[in-house]
Structure formats: structure tokens, C-alpha cells
Image (cartoon, rainbow, N blue to C red):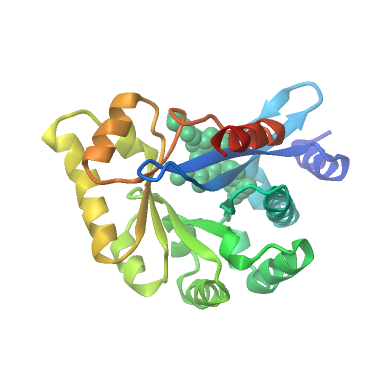
């Protein structure tokens, strides 16, 4: 079987699973969101990273049904957490470049929210700069529509793309997610903190939230805190967790 056929099969057979990774506000101690991260639970290979199959799924268009499955599953899970009595939080879903080309994107999102009963305020869509770059004009209309619906919009991997500053003016965003490459090299050296300080100041000036990604150590967490970054995500707080473990994580935070 080709990998392409295997992907079709995986979707039909329910071999895809979503892991959830918390985003925390270290000032309030609250969990503000859970990012949905797709994995393929392959019968013999075990868990396969999206880096291995999303490029192909993008190429052959399978990312469209797969992405819709991720969105529906993540929204339904968030609704289930709310029904179970957890404090409401957002579920953050990554949009692929190809999804961001689909003329029915906004209608699809609206439909999934209606089906799952999740309020748009509890959905966050993560869009990278390179994804935006591939569809600036239509994309801007769609992002505005989603924003107007109340969906939370984040720019993912911020700082790794090309002309991000222009997009910040053109697109309505709620949040900048500072790419983990900037956090990885973070030491208590002026040169390392300069970029992150600048992004935090930029976010504040534009009235955006700023989330630091890839926070792995206590030292990084404290440094970010000293730079007035309040929202963080990374292994220091939690690995991406399968749904039962994610629910336990929420339980321990109650
Ligand atoms: O979770 P992990 O670090 O393995 O993710 C690797 C990459 O795959 C990241 O860039 C992440 O944004 C992306 N990714 C994870 N889940 C999804 C998904 O549901 N849709 C898309 N388009 N990308 C995803
Ligand atoms: O591109 P995006 O930011 O959506 O991808 C997030 C990716 O980063 C996921 O693959 C996730 O598993 C991974 N990730 C999450 N936290 C950490 C971390 O603290 N360190 C590293 N190296 N990767 C992380
Ligand atoms: Mn992301
Ligand atoms: Na990112």
C-alpha cells in the first residue's frame, strides 16, 4: 500500500488521534487553552508525527478531510470538558496552508461549531505566517469573518516567516505565538532576550496576547516571566497528552 492509500485508510479506520498540550497563564495559574496536536496511531509503526505525513496530505488534498476531523474532534472534546464542569478554556487547532485556501473554510468552521455546540469564543485557530502569505487577499476576508464570529485567531511560529509585521496590520489577530526557536536559545544574555522582549513589547503595543512556545526549563520560564511574558506552553508545563491524561491534568488544576 502506498502511504497515500494508508492515509485514506487511517482516516476511515479511526487511526488518527489528537494529543492536547496546555497553555498556561503563569500569573493567574489558569489553563487558558489546550492545543490540539494530531498524531497517527499506526498499527505497527506506533505514533507517527504529523511532520511525517502532513506534507503528503497537503499535496494530495487529504489534509482537507483530516483537518476537518481534527477540528470537529477538538471542538467536541472541548464541549465535553465544559459539560464535565471544568473552567472554560479554548481549544487551539492548527490550520494547514491548503485548508487556508478552501473557499468554504468559514462555512466549514461555522458548521462544526453548530454541530458540536461549542461557542466560537472557545475555539482558537492557529495560522502561520507562511500559510497567510500564500493567500493574503481571500485569507484576510476569511480571518475577518472568523474574528467577527468570535473565533480566537493566533499567528503561530511568529518570527520565523517573512514579512510578519505587515500582516499584523492587515489581519485581525488576538495572539502571537513566539516560535520555540527563540525560546530554545534563551539564556540570561542581552542578545538572547532582545528578540523576545521586542516581540512582547510589540504585542503589548498592538494589544495582542503573547504566548511563548517551547518552554522546557524552569530557567526559561523565569526569564520569560521577568520579561513580562505571562502565557506559556511547553514541556516544562506538560507534554502533549492523550485525551484521558489531558483530562487528568485539568482535574489536578481544579
Ligand atoms: O506535535 P508536533 O510537534 O509533532 O507537531 C509537528 C507539527 O505539526 C507542528 O508544526 C504542528 O503545528 C503541526 N500539526 C500538529 N497537529 C496539526 C494539525 O492538526 N493540523 C496541521 N495542519 N498541523 C498540525
Ligand atoms: O508549529 P507548532 O507550534 O504548532 O508546533 C508545536 C510543536 O512543538 C508540536 O509538535 C509539539 O509537540 C512541540 N512542542 C511542544 N512543546 C515543546 C517543547 O517544550 N519543546 C519542544 N522542543 N517541542 C515542543
Ligand atoms: Mn501550533
Ligand atoms: Na508554533
Residue 182 higher or lower than 161, as above or below: above
Residue that appears at 47% across and 45% down: 30
x and y, in percent, of residue 140 in the image: 47, 74
On-image quarter of the N terminus: top right
Please give the count of numbered marks on the rendered protein: 0
Residue that appears at 71% across and 68% down: 108
x and y, in percent, of residue 5 in the image: 82, 41
Q: Is residue 4 left or right of residue 151?
A: right
Residue 209 higher or lower than 138, as above or below: above
Residue 96 higher or lower than 150, as above or below: above
Q: Is residue 227 visible?
A: yes
Q: Is residue 143 left or right of residue 166?
A: right
Residue that appears at 23% across and 64% down: 205
x and y, in percent, of residue 25 in the image: 41, 45
On-image quarter of the C terminus: top right
Q: Is residue 51 visible?
A: no
Residue 66 higher or lower than 51, as above or below: below
To which quarter of the image does residue 45 belong? top right
User: Is 196 in front, or is 229?
Assistant: 229
User: Is 50 in front, or is 222?
Assistant: 222
User: Is 177 in front, or is 247?
Assistant: 247
Amino acid at each position: 500500500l502506498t502511504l497515500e492509500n494508508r492515509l485514506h485508510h487511517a482516516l476511515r479506520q479511526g487511526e488518527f488521534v489528537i494529543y492536547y498540550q496546555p497553555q498556561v497563564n503563569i500569573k493567574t495559574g489558569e489553563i487558558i487553552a489546550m492545543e490540539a496536536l494530531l498524531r497517527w496511531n499506526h498499527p505497527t509503526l506506533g505514533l507517527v508525527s504529523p511532520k511525517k505525513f502532513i506534507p503528503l496530505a497537503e499535496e494530495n488534498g487529504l489534509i482537507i478531510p483530516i483537518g476537518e476531523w481534527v477540528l470537529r474532534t477538538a471542538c467536541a472534546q472541548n464541549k465535553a470538558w465544559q459539560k464535565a464542569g471544568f473552567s472554560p478554556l479554548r481549544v487551539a487547532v492548527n490550520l494547514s496552508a491548503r485548508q487556508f485556501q478552501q473557499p468554504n473554510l468559514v462555512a466549514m468552521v461555522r458548521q462544526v461549531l453548530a454541530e458540536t455546540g461549542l461557542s466560537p469564543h472557545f475555539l482558537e485557530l492557529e495560522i502561520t505566517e507562511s500559510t497567510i502569505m500564500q493567500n493574503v487577499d481571500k485569507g484576510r476576508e476569511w480571518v475577518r469573518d472568523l474574528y467577527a464570529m468570535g473565533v480566537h485567531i493566533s499567528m503561530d511560529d511568529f518570527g520565523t516567516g517573512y514579512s510578519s509585521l505587515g500582516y499584523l496590520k492587515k489581519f485581525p489577530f488576538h495572539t502571537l505565538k513566539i516560535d520555540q526557536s527563540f525560546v530554545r536559545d534563551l539564556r540570561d544574555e542581552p542578545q538572547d532576550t532582545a528578540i523576545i522582549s521586542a516581540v512582547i513589547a510589540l504585542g503589548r503595543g498592538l494589544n495582542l496576547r503573547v504566548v511563548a512556545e517551547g518552554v522546557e526549563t524552569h530557567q526559561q520560564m523565569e526569564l520569560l516571566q521577568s520579561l513580562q511574558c505571562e502565557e506559556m506552553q511547553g514541556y516544562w508545563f506538560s507534554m502533549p497528552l492523550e485525551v484521558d491524561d489531558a483530562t487528568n491534568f485539568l482535574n489536578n488544576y481544579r
